[in-house]
Amino acid sequence: MEFLLRVWRQAGPDAPGGFEEYRARDVKEDMSILEMLDQVNQDLVKEGRDPIVFESDCREGICGVCGLVIEGVPHGEPKKTTTCELRMRHFREGQTITIEPFRAGALPIIKDLMVDRTALDQLIQSGGYVSSRTGSSPEANTIPVAKQDQEEAMDAAECIGCGACVAACPNASAMLFTGAKVSHLAKLPQGRPEAARRVTAMTGRMQELGFGNCSNHYECQAVCPKDIHVKFISRMNREFIKALFKKKN
Amino acid sequence: MELDGKVPSGPVQDKWDKYKIDGLKLVNPANKRKYKAIVVGTGLAGASAAASLGELGYNVEAFCYQESPRRAHSIGAQGGINAAKNYQNDGDSIYRLFYDTIKGGDFRAREANVYRLAQLSTAIIDLCVAQGIPFTREYGGLLANRSFGGTQVSRTFYSRGQTGQQLLLGAYQAMMAQVQAGRVTVRGRREMVDLVLVDGEAKGVIMRNLRTGELESYAADAVILASGGYSTVFNLSTNAVGSNVGAAMRAYRKGAYFSNPCYTQIHPTCIPFSGSHQSKLTLMSESLRNDGRVWVPRQKGDTRHPSQIPEQERDYYLERKYPSFGNLSPRDISSRAAKEVCDEGRGVGDTGYAVYLDFEDAFNRLGSEIMDERYGNLFEIYQQITGEDVHEQMRMRIYPAPHYTMGGLWVDYNLQSNVPGLFVLGEANFSDHGANRLGASALMQGLADGYFIIPYTIGNYFARTNPGQVDTDRSEFAQCREEVERRNKELMAIQGNKTAHELRIELGDVMLDNVGMSRSRESLQTALKEIARVRDEFWNNLKVPGTDKALNQELEQAWRLAESLDFAEVMAHDALNREESCGCHFRVEYQTEDGEALRNDREYAYVSAWEFKGVGREPVMHKEPLEFEEVSPSTRSYK
């Protein structure tokens, strides 16, 4: 297969960026889009040109580092796929493919397709955990957890922190990411003692970091490679309101 | 020289508890804040160590090459984590987990370490549940278990098919809580390019800031390496594309011994290789073997669709050869058996290097719903990569792939290397899995090392040293930086015709062909010649564009490959030296009549520990004899 690639190139965070075109030749349909970019980069290096900077690591859809915007969609079509899992068999022979970085004020571009997602770490740091010191845990089966609660917690905990939800949101909101962590921990008895403190701290931090608010577009769920449900945003809102009442008492 | 593992005396059951009382000194709570530890790598071992040391009140500076610690490759582990809880009432105990692990490792691990690991396994589960890790549960609300290769009890805890992800996020979150508390600092996009020794003790590191290209110096009272394994020395493995042996090799160059590098595990159930464009192989958790049956056609070159091949013309070779463990035979045995039937010409798929993992019986027995609950995400991954739906096909094609490495830097019972102040945790050390690791034991070891061992043993080291003696103004730091600078300049100056990517594949193929699933004296000698050839080509014909003073992904790859090339040589030497077959190390010269591994306890019951003597010069081997006080090494049989 052969494709024409339009790729966003940008030398640094403050440098102006723009699209450049590259031909991708000898593409196999089993290749992932990143393996195609690897191949293009090999040619660029050999020609003495600057290879395209993009990130990837596990290449199996779990580390969450590889987000690109492909044809206007974070992680591209089809749904429930990370960029590294996206195979070339989903494209039409000869097609022009536009590849851009995630764009959001809180996730600034470092170079070309590489963005800075440390804001997501800072969100977790603000409260996305159970304060459970090593050595002080009760026996694991002391507290039974209803299977459906554990399953729902797991549905939220599957988030890989890629930031596609932020990139897809017209408000660049991190509500799905934050909602997933708040819900995962709020759904389990172990997370309840800190539930109010957690939701207050995390939503506060979200605003400080420059993420927008949710206005119910649900683009986030549509692009989420792990299909994290927007109901977790509603749950976060409920937790937030509960926390408000708790404070008043 | 014989190495001393510093194993405490007394019965194996009491060693750790007794040692904590009379062997390990404590640091006064008010003094802890004066000490600082550097942690390199933020996978399960590194993140859990950083979290628990921070909780104790130490200062920690943690580094990872990834943008965020949550991306470390522990996240890729699918199947589960073992613990001797005996929740299933099926006869499990600490002793049984200990025995299974020692036996699974083919009696090439240090007994006392393995017993301690089994003892700590239960506390790990307690802690993880308290952290909010959503382990899969039964309808009564209690924790579920599944069985795994190499054992006859169900002791594996799991979170769907993403156990590594959930455990890593737990450790990461615990560490981020300590970042919030001000005791841990995390620095991402940093690659460890040197270890700094002061008066023979590890007191700092040089990091290359991958975003800016700058070299940075960091000093501390001790250095903890938790930088993972070395499977990426092979062409295509299940590791992340960034995983590399660089940090461990920098320590090796500074005098830390490298142990058992020839012990590498080839995982039996991966999606088969499809073409040269591929950047990695994807693992299918071996938990699939609980419900899947492995087979190939009885006839060579049988190209019929698998559903057209009748039962009597299928060879369920694992069930046939190993009736009591069958499809759950240990990883090394299953992998080698797959290679054997494919070498015979009975493999399936386009390349002939694949076998079937068949779920027809399981779908009929359990139905789609239960199968999806157990393996749904694995079926999805399989479909994404191959375009085939397991629900329709009822089977997958699988083949073994390099996955985990049991060898690593030598450590004593304290997890301290022979370089004082340098501690090594998780996959980066050699200590607990012997010549073969059982499934669901890597997560257990990483977390045992980080949460429950290093907090005690590093305290013992700190208690004997004054805090804050070293800062980065010392000449040792400047010297190391200059050395790294020079090496970078050399790499940049070659300006030849081959990319690091191409050379990495060349080395990887040499290793796979000659130091892979089976080895011979001849293949290892070929490997040594070929490694030298590729290294020569690397240093004369490499092309790296750009500059070393900026973000440069090609230079990152080249740096890692330079380390891999030197490492590959140590690995081949070790495999050549070990004239026996044990666990994953299969020397074709040493096998029984039925083609099973033939161990030689009289001559090879030791841990090898290689000392660096300069690039291109043969390393020198030291030995730590393995003494078995509790179990007597027997011939492993899974028949």
Image: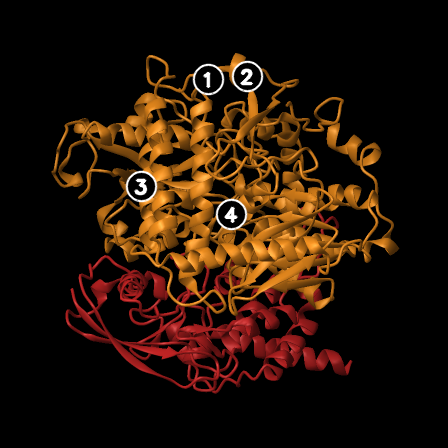
**Label 2, residues with CA under 10 Å away: few <14, some 14-19, many ≥20:** some
| B252 horizontally vs B3: left or right | left
Q: Which chain is orange?
A: B
Residue in the picture at 29% in, 53% down: B278
How far is the residue under mark 4 from the one under mark 1?
34 Å
Q: Are marks 3 and 2 on the same chain?
A: yes
Report the colour scheme: by chain
Q: Amino acid at mark 4?
A: Tyr
Q: Nearer the viewer, mark 3 or mark 2?
A: 3
How far is the residue under mark 4 from the one under mark 3?
34 Å
Tell me whether the residue at label 1 lies in contact with that at label 2, contact meaning CB atoms closer than 8 angstroms. Answer: yes
**Image x and y of residue B492, in percent:** 42, 60
Q: Nearer the viewer, residue A17 or B539?
A: B539
| B421 horizontally vs B530: left or right | right
How far is the residue under mark 3 from the one under mark 2?
35 Å
Q: Secondary structure at mark 4?
A: loop
Residue that numbered label 3 is attached to: B509
Residue that numbered label 1 is attached to: B599
Q: Are marks 1 and 3 on the same chain?
A: yes
What number is the disc on residue B633?
2
Q: Nearer the viewer, mark 1 or mark 2?
A: 1
